[in-house]
Image: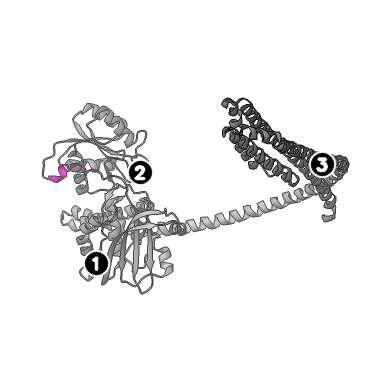
Amino acid sequence: MRWQSLPLVAGFAVLALIVGSRAMLVEEQRANRAAAREAIEYQQLLSGLLSLAQEAENGQHGYLLTGEKSYLEPYRNAVGAIPGQLARIDSLTAPDEQLVQPINHIKDALSQKQAELAETIALYDQGNATKALDLIRSGQGKAVMDEIRTSMDTVRRISAAAVAARDEHIDQVEAWLRIGSLAALLAIFLLAGYAIRESRRRFHEVAVAQDELVRKNVALGNEIETREKAESQIRQMHKMEAVGQLTGGIAHDFNNMLAVIISAMNLAQRKLARGEHDIAQFIDAAIDAATRAANLTARLLAFSRQQPLAPQIVDANRLLTGMSDLIRRALGETIRIETVLAGGLWKTHADPSQIENAVLNLAVNAMGDDGKLTIETANSHLDDSYAAAHAEVAAGQYVMIAVSDTGSGMTPDVIAKAFEPFFTTKAVNKGTGLGLSQVFGFVKQSGGHVNIYSEPGEGTTIKIYLPRYFGAEEPAGPTGRGDNPAAPVTEAILVVEDDARVRVSTTEAIRELGYTVIHAASGEEALQKLAENPNVALLFTDIVMPVMNGRKLAEEALARMPLLKVIFTTGFTRNAVVHNGVLDHDVHFLAKPFTIEQLAAKLRDVLGTTQGAAD
């Protein structure tokens, strides 16, 4: 291949030489024209000097002959212009070395002429006209002018000879280039024939190689497809394993709770059938199991980042100070608790109740029966390098809340699985394995980051990073009837729920609280009930309903009754009133399941506000 390419390389080299020579010729022509222009300009400037000298001489002769001062005006103008003319000559590019001597002769002669003219005028002004005329008749001035003219002729001859020499050189180069161009044209035809033959041969080789490449690509595609199928099967196996662990944990915990509920209800039924009424312990057990089941569901929603959050501007220092007694009661007196709160701590925008739950979860998960627990806050900046090393972390400023213990610590294997649901190192019945996964889900849903720092035997530190809030402070919400829970209730409430059993239980619970209750099974029926009962003060509606969901129902109802209050409720919602995991602004929400106490507090809070729900 190297020898086959040699003619092409040689041909291109010849072409490059011809093109380069032509470019050099063009440059020489440009240089020649520039030199000619420069020589002409020199000659014009020198001729201008000669004209000025003659004008000065004429002015001198006129003055000496007439004695009129007006004849000196041309003399003065010429003498004044000569320095500028000389400066322009000196500012040009230096001429050829052969021109230096005649040009210097011109300058020297010009200086002598100016001196002779000045001397004769001075003699005449002193009244010695005879001596001035004798100086003129001596022929000194004429000799100087003849010398200037002779030097200028020399400059013209030298410049003309230089231009002619350049032209002759360019003519020779052009002649050789014509011959070279004809030879290059012949070489181009020969190279074209050779290139066509070579291109046909190489095209055939490329076609053969392309066919081989297509065959190999097909084989590679088949191999990739086989590998992707295998990887897909492996990923599916891992997913099924994770789902199996998750569903197994859910089934285990829910079955335990349902066993307690079913057993308690069966025992209560039997006792009531025998006329016995000491069933409070069974009802308490069933309520406790149902509450734990609801908490388990909430933790699963938190882990999956689907829980509805109600973020507010939070001062973490104030929040932790307010929950210190709660933490002490949860951990017991054998645990020493130390709080280190940073001064000038930034604000964050998050759900304060979820922050409390997260800190409490970390505190409870951290400690055994004794030891020291440290809760710390700080302003933290996670830079680009940290963000690059940790997935799903955006660089920026964060409010850091750290919970540290003096326990046994974690091994790297345990740290890697710590946030997985139902993973726990505690003994049976000592934990669900959802505490850290709930914290992880809440922090990620809030746009934050959580990390574990631990070594076996050295304790554990879990750090929560919540994004810094840069906006203005939000005004405190209006307080309602919750400030006076003993105030009598007189309002009418419309309950909308498509599930009959839930509708009955909710209606009875609200009626038990003393409110007047109207109920409907669908959005259409609810609008009809509102039209029939204009005194309804609050709409309590499920979100997930067929045909018309709760959000659309609320919008239509508020369009008809702008002062109507609205509370949404559901067990799970993604798009109706919750977007990106955050409740819409000014939306009142009560998650299912709820206790009658939670229901009463929410009703008192909403009915006591001065504005209805937002559209």
Residue closest to the eye, 371 or 494:
371
First reached walking from the N terminus: tag 1 or tag 3: 3
Toward the viewer: 315 or 270?
A: 315
Residue 200 is at least partly visible in this image = yes
Q: Are marks 2 and 1 in contact (CB under 8 Å)?
A: no
- Quarter assignment of residue 572: top left
Mark nearer the viewer, 1 or 3: 3
Distance in Å between CA atoms under marks 2 and 1: 39 Å
* Residue 480 drawn in magenta: yes
Where does label 1 land, which residue?
338
As helix, strand or loop, the secondary structure at mark 3 comes to helix
Q: Which residue is mark 2?
A: 573
Does residue 153 appear left or right of residue 308 in this picture?
Answer: right
Disc 3: which residue? 165
Residue placed at 68% from the left, 45% from the top? 94
- In the picture, the quarter occupied by the C terminus is top left
Measure the C-alpha gap from mark 2 to mark 3: 97 Å
Q: Nearer the viewer, residue 111 or 245?
A: 111
- CA neighbours of label 2 inside 10 A, class few (<14), some (14 to 19), many (20+): some
Query: Does label 2 or label 1 sit earlier along the sequence?
Result: 1
Determine the residue positioned at 34% across, 37% down.
545
- Neighbor class of circle 1 (other Cα within 10 Å; few <14, some 14-19, many 20+) is few
Which residues, given as a range, are shown in magenta? 476-483
| Numbered disc 2: secondary structure | loop
Q: Amino acid at mark 2?
A: Thr
Residue 351: percent from left, percent from top: 29, 50
Instruction: Tell me the quadrant of the picture where the N terminus can be found.
Output: bottom right
User: Taking the image as drawn, is residue 422 in sight?
Assistant: no
What amino acid is at disc 1? Answer: Glu
